[in-house]
Amino acid sequence: MPNTACTTETTRSRTKRIWAPDERVTLSQAARIAPGGVSPNCVWRWCRRGVLSRMGERIRLEHIRAGGKLFTTPRWIEEFGHRLAEADAAYFETAGEPVPTPAPSPSPPRRRARRRPTDQEEAERQARVRAELDAEGL
């Protein structure tokens, strides 16, 4: 069944598709719609991780998952841009006041590298193992 929710606009160089505001689009299609010439991977990051605003708030692009794919809509892309702009405006309105910094996320504990035994320690360990094996009769 043909998709009647969108129209096309033809210019000299190419045909541009005009999406309906609530039509679901893939992330590749969303990358073509979004301003700034972003990649599909960038749109994926907007959905999954979001963008950290200057105020420390994480703003994500609204999306749905269907059949193992992520979809968004042109309206959600536009709202995402408006939320980012509002967050920036709020930051610059409080430019003279101290901005609360987000609490740093705790980093995972670092594993220490195991110290390699010296040749003498290794020889002593092997001697203990041999003594245990001899005691067991093996």
Image (spheres, rainbow, N blue to C red):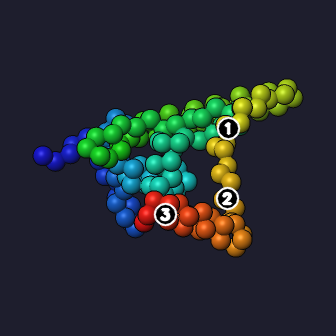
> Residue 84 at what x, y percent from top left?
60, 36
Q: Which residue is mark 3?
A: 133
Q: Amino acid at mark 2?
A: Ala
The residue positioned farthest toward the left in the image shown: 1
Q: Which residue is mark 1?
A: 106
Please give left or right for residue 69 compared with residue 80 in the image: left
Residue 21: give its label: none
Q: Camera-side residue: 71 or 2?
A: 71
Q: Residue at x 57, y 35 (%)?
A: 59
> Residue 116 at what x, y percent from top left?
68, 66
Q: Residue at x 55, y 54 (%)?
A: 36
How many marks can you see? 3
Please give left or right for residue 71 compared with residue 131 in the image: left
Frontmost of labels 2 and 1 is 2
Which image quarter holds the C terminus?
bottom left
> Residue 73 at what x, y percent from top left?
38, 39
Q: Is residue 127 above or below residue 95?
A: below
Does residue 20 appear in the picture of this structure? no
Q: Residue at x 66, y 44 (%)?
A: 109
Q: Residue at x 65, y 51 (%)?
A: 111
Q: Is residue 38 above or below residue 73?
A: below
Rounded to the nearest whole Å, what is the CA distance between mark 3 and mark 2? 30 Å
In the rendered structure, are the residues bearing label 2 and label 1 in contact, judged by CB atoms less than 8 Å apart?
Answer: no
The quadrant where residue 87 appears: top right
Q: Which residue is mark 2?
A: 113
Q: Secondary structure at mark 2?
A: loop
Rounded to the nearest whole Å, what is the CA distance between mark 2 and mark 1? 21 Å
Please give left or right for residue 88 compared with residue 136 in the image: right
The quadrant where residue 76 appears: top left
